[in-house]
Amino acid sequence: MLEPGRYIKDILRQAPGTAVTAHGWVKTRRDSKGVHFVQLNDGSCFQDLQVVIEAGTLAEAVLKQVTTGACIRVEGDLVESPAAGQAVELRARAIHIFGEADPATYPLQKKGHTMEFLREIAHLRVRSNTFGAVFRVRNALSFAIHRFFQERGFLYVHTPIITTSDAEGAGAMFGVTTLDLMNLPRIAQGPQAGQVDFSQDFFGKPAHLTVSGQLEAEIFALAFANVYTFGPTFRAENSNTPRHLAEFWMIEPEMAFCDLAGNMRLAEEFLKYIIQYVMEHCLPDLEFFNKRIDDTVLQTLEHVATSDFAHITYTEAISLLEKAPRTWEFPVYWGADLQSEHERYLTEETFRRPVIVTDYPREIKAFYMRLNDDGRTVRAMDVLAPRIGEIIGGSQREERYDVLRDKIRQQGLDERAYWWYLELRKYGSAPHAGFGLGLERMLMYLTGMKNIRDVIPFPRTPGYAEF
RNA sequence: UCCCCGCUAGCUCAAUGGCAGAGCGUUCGGCUGUUAACCGAAAUGUUGGUGGUUCGAGUCCACCGCGGGGAGCCA
């Protein structure tokens, strides 16, 4: 394995005159009369190591195998590069071929490929410039998220992937079962006769993949004060858009002794922190995105990291939209949910920066959000970002037992299914709040990538679960 | 799931119902150290699938599949 100091990113920082050995995959090769240039990359950084092979240095048979896609080891001397583009280059003395790649069939040749094509070769696309940058940024982002919360004393909690509380209510869920689907056990008699007998299933009742760790995170917040989850989440919605996945990663902080104002402060501080971290640690990758994917990325990130987010209430947003000099496809009135066109207008045209919209009508938000004194709005917040829409959704939670119980009843939910959630309000309840951030949505924002399927290693969407 | 658009060489795309094309990549040759190198030449096709209309279908029609954009749902 590569020890620290032997990655290409380390080799590129070493002084000329050093003897080094580099490992990696050939990105491209250019031939001149007496010299060959090989771009070598091991994924450790955006920049390739330029390997220079003087004619006659290597056996013709070896040289012939140094083709795009091949995996090689190069031993040689690091020297100052006489040409622009790189400070140092590796003058090869010997090359070992680990694995060749037939140029006639290797699909990742040096040319522009569409994202759609690269998605079909997800086992190879990670070696491309774009996806190398995407996954380095994804890695840095993940680390920055942990660091942000750890620095603030948040406890990292692992909420369950499999859940039997079909009560989360956040969209369609994937079933989890060991029953034989071709031969389902049925209840023989009684009022439920003919229905599937889940008492024979693995968990003795219907089970699903989680759609959110929030309710369980609340349990931990009421013992550890500040906690966060960071894990996979599953939605069986038939959503076919560039912004939805059936399997995605979500970060959900939950804070006791916190109201909506504190929640908003944390969300803004959090977004700025992770943006700054990625800008500090992945600048060459971001510069590439800015050059080839979206030429507004760097400017937008700098702007967001340094400017204050706009804050408006839902009621103010409706009033703004009603006065907007344009016609809406979906009508704007108090009580209507904000549509994509409305969110985009607010964040892209009115404010031109992230906007936090708060205090939505109770009817269009989840039962667990804290009721305001006006009795018609709840302490919800959505952070809207230009181009991708809602990036964070959160709220102050209803901590009052009676109010929560009434809201559960009013929404026609079975309060017995929420027995432990209600008990949290009975024993040592506290004001608390939290939010959810979609990791992939954040990555789209950071990279300018247009399709969420291109910021996750192996996307799962309706009708697609390859690799 | 709904609306719109698309599917032709490895990739990106042309082709009035009448001989299947180009650029890039690949291969070969040239070029004084290149940077998405450059110059010249060559090879490369079950036109997404199944039916249908027609003397004749890449082109028109039907159904199916896949992809993209927009919408809904949301993170």
Image: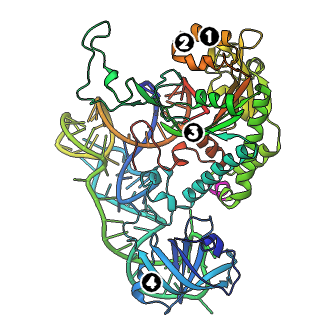
User: What amino acid is labelled 4 in the image?
Assistant: Leu
The residue drawn where x is 45% and y is 78% is A66
Q: Disc 4 marks which residue?
A: A63
Above or below — where is A249 with respect to B4?
A: below
- Measured in 3D between alpha carbons, the distance from the residue under mark 4 to the one under mark 2, in whole angstroms, is 72 Å
SS category of the residue bearing label 2: helix
Chain for numbered disc 4: A
Q: Which residue range is magenta in the image?
A: A288-292
Q: Earlier in the sequence, mark 4 or mark 2?
A: 4
Q: Disc 3 marks which residue?
A: A158
Whether the residues at callouts 4 and 3 have beta carbons within 8 Å, the answer is no
Which corner quadrant of the image does residue B37 belong to? bottom right
- Measured in 3D between alpha carbons, the distance from the residue under mark 1 to the one under mark 3, in whole angstroms, is 27 Å
User: What amino acid is labelled 3 in the image?
Assistant: His
Chain for numbered disc 1: A
Q: Position of residue A404 (x, y in %)?
A: 64, 13
Q: Disc 1 marks which residue?
A: A405
Q: Earlier in the sequence, mark 1 or mark 4?
A: 4
Q: Disc 2 marks which residue?
A: A415
In the depicted view, which residue is nearer to us: B16 or A225? A225
Q: Earlier in the sequence, mark 2 or mark 3?
A: 3
User: What amino acid is labelled 1 in the image?
Assistant: Arg
